[in-house]
Amino acid sequence: MTLADLPHLSELQLHNVPITSDIPSPCSLTNVEISCSKIPFDFVAFLSGVPMLEYASFIELIGPKPHPSFDDSRDISNRPTIPLHRLQKLTFQWCRDVDYDAILRSITYPNSAKVSLVMKTSPTVLFSEFIPECLRTLLGSCSVLFLSLLEEDTQDIVILELHSPNSASYHLELNYTVVSRIPGLLPKKATTASSERIFKDLMKRGCSLRNLRRLKLVLPSLPSSRTLTSLLERSVDLEEIWVETNNARALITALELPVPS
């Protein structure tokens, strides 16, 4: 089956059904949900043929293997821009061998859109290596930033959400496989995505946070007070900070507040 056989289709939901990226012209698709073991087509080619698209979700189902880090060396300057003026939400989950940077650079969408990338990696890879190059500038100038680290038995889940008044909202989720945690024992240091490591990694990438207004952190443990102080010094326009953690002493020290007795 090809989409060329269904020119008037507006909604498409497929689960493990073979399909090609051949798009009829004109195409009326507004809602697309595709999940299978391996999505067998070119995403850029597909998106270029669905100008009415509002919602799209692409999920690969079988045991997601670690993604390679982004290759920013590809020349995409000569590619035509794909206008998706109605897009509200675009999601990629577990999609392997996909150049997200090339996809996001190739399409334009309204500031009200939400883009979600869910990936898996090994514990030795830095978080920032998975942030598409086109979003790293936004990371340095975003007004709202949410960072969360969830610890489960077999994985650490790092969630980064960022937004600015002149951009869409982005949700980046990275899953690190870890050694199974035994009650009373700490996991091996090399197999955990610690908050200290994440913060230092992001700041090393030149993230200035100069326009940051709102910061929300949900972390089992905060980075050191020194790292937090460096973060706050960069965030000169910060108006609101919301923190959920097991021990806030590092933040209290960084803010130079009296420690509660």
Image (tube, rainbow, N blue to C red):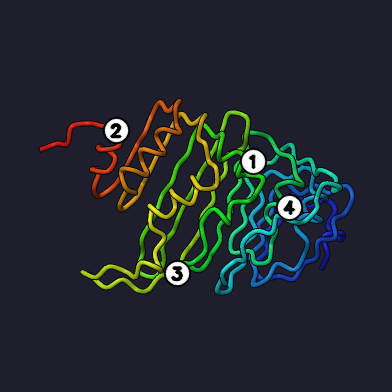
Amino acid under disc 4: Ala
Give the residue at x 80% y 50%.
Answer: 76
Amino acid carrying label 1: it is: Gln
Mark 1 or mark 3: whose residue is earlier in sequence: 1
Q: Which residue is mark 3?
A: 177
Q: Which residue is mark 2?
A: 255
* Structural crowding at the residue carrying mark 1, measured as other residues with C-alpha within 10 Å and reported as few (<14), some (14–19) or many (≥20): some
Callout in the foreground (1, 4): 4
Secondary structure under tag 1 reads: loop
Amino acid type, residue under disc 3 in the picture:
Thr
* Residue holding disc 1: 88
The reply, left or right, for residue 89 in relation to residue 44 is: left
Give residue 30's position: percent from left, percent from top.
72, 46
Secondary-structure class at tag 2: loop
- Disc 1/disc 4 C-alpha distance (Å): 19 Å
**In this view, 32 is above or below 85:** below
Query: Farthest residue toward the left?
Result: 261
Secondary structure category for the residue under label 3: strand
Crowdedness of circle 2 by 10 Å Cα count: few (<14), some, many (20+)? few
Of badges 2 and 3, nearer the viewer stands: 2
Disc 2/disc 3 C-alpha distance (Å): 34 Å
Quadrant holding the N terminus:
bottom right
Q: Earlier in the sequence, mark 2 or mark 3?
A: 3
Q: What whole-number distance in Å separates the C-alpha atoms at marks 2 and 1?
A: 38 Å
What residue did someone put label 4 on? 102
Residue 42 figure quarter: bottom right
- Residue 95 location, quadrant: bottom right
As drawn, the residue found furthest toward the right would be 25
